[in-house]
Image: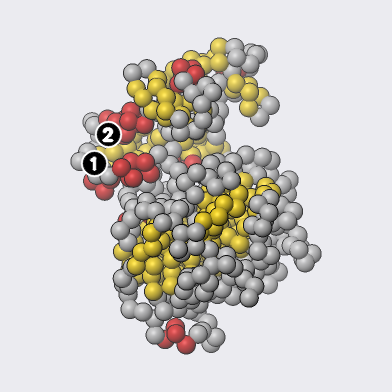
Amino acid sequence: MTRLPLALALAVAGCATHAEDSTVPPDGVDTADTGTTADTSDTADTSALPPECEHLAPLPVEAGYLSGFTGAEDFAFDAEGRLVSIDPYGNLVAITQDGTQQVILPQATAYGAGTHFLPDGEIVFCDVEAGSLVRVDPNTGESTVVLGGLEYPNGLDVGTDGFVYVSEQNAGRVRRVDPVTGEYAIILTGLYQPNGVTFAPGFDRIFVGSFGAGVVWAADRNPDETWSEPRIYGTTPEAPGVPPDWCDSHAVGDACPLEGGYSLGACADDGTGDLTCAENLAFDACVDKAEDESCTSELLGTTIDQTCHSRRGSLWCPRTPTEAEASCSGKSQGDRCSVGSGRGQCSTTFEGVLACWDYNAYYTEMVDSCADKALDDECAIVDTHYPTVGRCQDGSAYGYTENLCLPVGSASQRGGLDAINTDACGNLYVSEYTMGKVWRFTAEGVEADEAATLSSMWIPNMHWGNGRGGWDEKTLYVMDRVGPGIFTLELGVGSHGDAYVPPE
């Protein structure tokens, strides 16, 4: 899934973390990462495969469609044969195929993502806006924040060990979280915009898809319960691949892309002599000043007058005009607003300030910033919500005749991998965000075959049915975020397994 501003254009054409990166699973086995390396062979073990693996449906398959669902980022099937997901109003709901709906938890989240059942039958989902992992008792609707302080929690899966494995798209990592205590271990790092998470049959290999690079990483569980270093398992056709680090070709203090490219940091020494893109809020502008006292900040050469705000126990000077912030005083995310001569909507800026965003001006700037530049020239979008440094790219894939200023890694519709899952034969399926493509990698990885083409520009997740309520065990169901509805792909094989086994 994505909440980046580019998603809007395409549709038209929080708490402290645990102090240590370690966790103790429910059975008391210590799983602190020792860095042990596992056998990373991608050769499939076919000794225990189900017989249907010899007679898979030929690709591509024709998709069916079921209407009347939520268009959620993710979903799961419960024991009663209901599809559980977040509806457009932020409620956690359960819906049957005939349209019967029950609200499990009203106003569960402003923006939810990864959703799954735990082995005990409780639900866990990512609260994207709050940056947290939330656990819900479906019988009582009682909810508990398992862990906060996550940086854009997105995809998740639940292992047979009972842990939640969740990606943090803005941090480039995957955590393994104890859903009872909230203790965690960071098991994979160095990933580019990690999104979907799933396991291979046996749950000893984890797959993670990139939302911008079109690659899938794999890592293997070691005998001591650590995980191997992630490696690229496969790449979808025409994908851009993992882009080079921006700061490799820039100097200390230069602006650089954060959070998928729609936020700004500054290149800084990471302590080893290498440069990395780091957050650079204007704390210095409020030294020796009081809260609400006037201050001045700077955004890509533009001076902005503001007042000192409090954040993290310190005062800082936001790069948001005071009039844009005032326009949303007393309003909520998504409310209409106006600033200057433009109209827009109240939206949280890249620095966490609720202010009026003139998104039409943003898209105009995407074009104007490349008007006098050539393809691949560096460019910048001076926008107080989503400031961008990137390169000029061909805009035809997005419905523009002009070149567009896009963050590195967003230069093509190709490569936005969203949904991810595996079947009982070890084949891996991924959806390509705006392309409407579902790809299948064999158990050996590397090259992908087209499994289906779906008539949607947002297909964020996929799951096999559980044999309840009409959800067929050998059909892969793919969420249509735009519809809203569910695509059905009859593949002739079932899921790789699930940590949640519904009671009979």
Give SS at disc 2.
helix
Q: Is residue 418 visible?
A: no
Disc ID at residue 400: 1
Q: Quadrant of the C terminus?
A: bottom right
Residues at marks 1 and 2, CA–CA distance in whole angstroms: 9 Å
Query: Where is residue 214, by image quadrant?
Result: bottom left
| Residue beneath disc 2 | 367
Between disc 1 and disc 2, whose residue precedes? 2
Answer left or right for 465 relative to 340: right
**Residue closest to the far right:** 28
Using the image, determine if residue 498 lies above or below residue 291.
below
| Residue ID at (37%, 46%) | 410
Query: Where is residue 256, by image quadrant?
Result: top left
Label 2 neighbour load within 10 Å: few <14, some 14-19, many 20+: many
Residue 69 or residue 412, whichever sits in front: 69
Residue 336 or residue 450, whichever sits in front: 336
Using the image, determine if residue 81 lies above or below residue 354.
below
Q: Position of residue 269 (x, y in %)?
A: 56, 38
Number of marks drawn: 2
Amino acid bearing label 2: Val
Amino acid bearing label 1: Tyr
| Residue ID at (44%, 85%) | 52
Q: Are marks 1 and 2 in contact (CB under 8 Å)?
A: yes
Give SS at disc 1.
loop
Q: Is residue 116 visible?
A: yes
| Residue ID at (57%, 43%) | 107
Q: How is the image coloured?
A: secondary structure
Q: Position of residue 175 (x, y in %)?
A: 62, 55
Answer left or right for 186 relative to 405: right
Using the image, determine if residue 36 lies above or below residue 289.
below
